[in-house]
Image: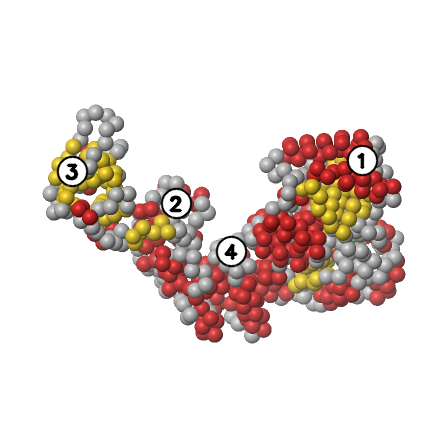
Amino acid sequence: MKNMNNYDYLLSDLTKLNGVGKKTMEILKKKKVNNIFDLLWRLPKSYTDRSLTSNICDLQIDKVQTIKIIPTKYLFPRVRNLPNRVNCEDETGKIDCIFFNSYEGYVKKILPLKEQVIISGKISSYKGKYQITNPTYVSKDSSIIETVHNKYSLTEGITEKIYNKIISQILKNLPKLTEWHDQRILKKFDNESWNNSIVKLHDTKNINNYKSGFYKRLAYDEILASFLVNSEIRKKIKKIKKVSKIFDQKSYYEIINKLNFKLTNDQKTSLTDINKDLVSKSKMFRLLQGDVGSGKTIVSLISALNVITSGFQVALLAPTEILARQHYNLAKKLFAKNISIELLSSKNENIEIKRIIKELKDNKIQMVFGTHAIFQKKIIFANLGYIIIDEQHKFGVRQRKLLSDKGGDNCDVLLMSATPIPRTLTMSVYGDMDVSIIKEKPNNRKEVKTYSKLENKIDDVIKFVKKEIIDGNQIFWVCPLIEESKKLDHQSSVNKYKFLDKLFPNKVALLHGKIKNDEKELILNKFLNKEYSILVSTTIIEVGIDFPNANVIIIENANKFGLSQLHQLRGRVGRGTKQASCILMFKSNLTVNAKKRINILKNSNDGFMISEEDMKLRGFGDLLGFKQSGVKNFRLADPIQNEDLFVLAEKEIRIIEQQNIDINKYKSLLKLYDQADIINDIV
Ligand code: ADP
Ligand code: MG
């Protein structure tokens, strides 16, 4: 294999390797190994030491051993299904090699009579004689066998032998990459170069050696690469020049005066951040992060007003139609009558949709609400100046960038998310954006009281519910989430509905995944108008919907949910001024871990803190469905174990940004690690 002396070799196709054909390549591709670099992260799990040879007389039964033998006689049976046998010996004793399912020609070839051959495998004994069945290694070349053999968690179709051959070949041919870190950083990792680190990573002596310099260096590389990509996107978007919006004090105060509450300080600060961006000459790409119920919607609507009075159009995109309508209704209430706003809904008559499309094109509509349908090709804005996106934490970096491009240069972008993420992850998840955070809850809020109850105590719960209904309160009843089966989800909610409907006739409504959108909205509206007291549902109520009168949420089989998800669900209640409660129900006694989780929820209402704890308990991979979000999982770096490296990388990014350090310095790092390939647009 020719050494290409740069990252190209590592990014090349696996068939560049000796011994890897189309078949092996296909097998590995299925395991998401697309190039040589990807293979570097499949690490040995253990090893077998075959370096010591023994004499036959010293062999130990049931152990893997290596011996030098001379074949003396072939015994090929004439009966089918019996194995081929070869008598072998050394100066000290005799041993038989047994081969099942083998051709005579093959056996003769690997064990030629009267020639010394090295074999390695597990030794057994049969009728008082040593034997070795299908030896793992047979070769005349001792250097191939007498060494340490790494064991990998093997992929079907690829043997240990092939694996070791591939990996040692790669390690031998590693290109010398120019160091991208400064001495100051390298010092922290025992000055380990990338090459050395990779070699050490595959050395079985180092299995699980997470604390050493080489391991940390590689973990840090990974973190820095992810941060750098985001930082570059952010810089790139910031460079986009736009026509700035004008801040209109009059309409600002008009809308503020219409509110029946005072904005919290965090809401005001966020608004200031956003307004500053809107009136600046560069494009805004900002995230408004705030716990459930922190009041993000109103912030976004107030900021939209500036854009409208500046003569631009605004689009607000929500994940569901129900939510889009809720925001639309709020805007209808708050905005002056002369501002033309519309809801683009799948329920609109065709002729209505045509009208909206035409008026958007003719600049007659100033703000439109809807789901992602807003971005259909046929919808053309005359002068789109602002996109607001609600509750889309599942958008990955790449999708966000596409979105930002879509609106055009003059279009500012605000994303809103109620999903707090652990601080160490902010840069990997949202590093491409500027971030405003609302930490404070509106101060009329009382903390939701959280209880846990065993399911067989349901009578207590019913008693409690009765009392709440008499007090005029409304209840969400969330049914068990059975991931294995949508059908069962549905069934359990139907059963619960029947059960409750008997106890509280005409007071219970049911929502589940099979109910059509139209009907869903109807039910939700009735619930909002207090026509029902209890809403039984699966988790549909999770995102965004605002029901100030709902005071109690009961979550069955609560151990099926992650902490952050429970916190989100709990956030559906406690939006009014009354004391709200959340009852978490469990089928059986809680495990120690489950108890810990419940205590975290009982003791805290702080979504950020809860997400940190959630991550510690569940690990990064499972958190928030990051896998779907496009944020790739790290290969080595662990946000919990390597928190220090995340902090270090964040500091480094600030230095790189402040000193305007040329990104080309990190070119190899980015080319190798940014498999999402975003950086190709940039470097
Ligand atoms: P989220 O941040 O979860 O999207 P919403 O914007 O839906 O929260 O707001 C939740 C509720 O809080 C709404 O009923 C809203 O009118 C109300 N609200 C927003 N800001 C304040 C405030 N400063 N004081 C009191 N209530 C507020
Ligand atoms: Mg919201």
**Mark 2 or mark 4, which has the lower sequence index?**
2
C-alpha gap between disc 2 and disc 1: 54 Å
How busy is the neighbourhood of tag 2: few (under 14 within 10 Å), some, or many (20 plus)?
few
Q: Nearer the viewer, residue 428 or 622?
A: 622
SS at badge 1: strand
Which mark is first along the chain, 2 or 3? 3
Q: Earlier in the sequence, mark 2 or mark 1?
A: 2
- Whether residue 308 appears in this view of the structure is no
- Left or right: residue 313 versus residue 80 is right
Label 2, secondary structure: give it. loop
Residue shown at the point (48%, 55%) measured from the top left = 635
Sequence-first disc among 1 and 4: 1
Q: Is residue 119 above or below residue 239?
A: above
Position of 18 with respect to 626 (left or right) is left
Category of crowding for the residue at label 1, using alpha-carbon neighbours closer than 10 angstroms: few (below 14), some (14–19), many (at least 20)? many
Q: Whole-percent x and y of residue 192? A: 41, 67
Q: Which residue is mark 2?
A: 154
Q: CA distance from mark 1 to mark 4?
A: 46 Å
Q: What element does badge 4 sit on?
A: loop
Identity, as a three-letter code, of the amino acid under mark 4: Phe
Residue at the spot of label 1? 508
Whether residue 269 sits left or right of residue 91 in the image: it is right
**Label for residue 120?**
none
Residue 87 - label: 3
- Report whether residue 574 is seen: yes
Q: CA distance from mark 2 to mark 4?
A: 21 Å
Q: Which residue is mark 4?
A: 634
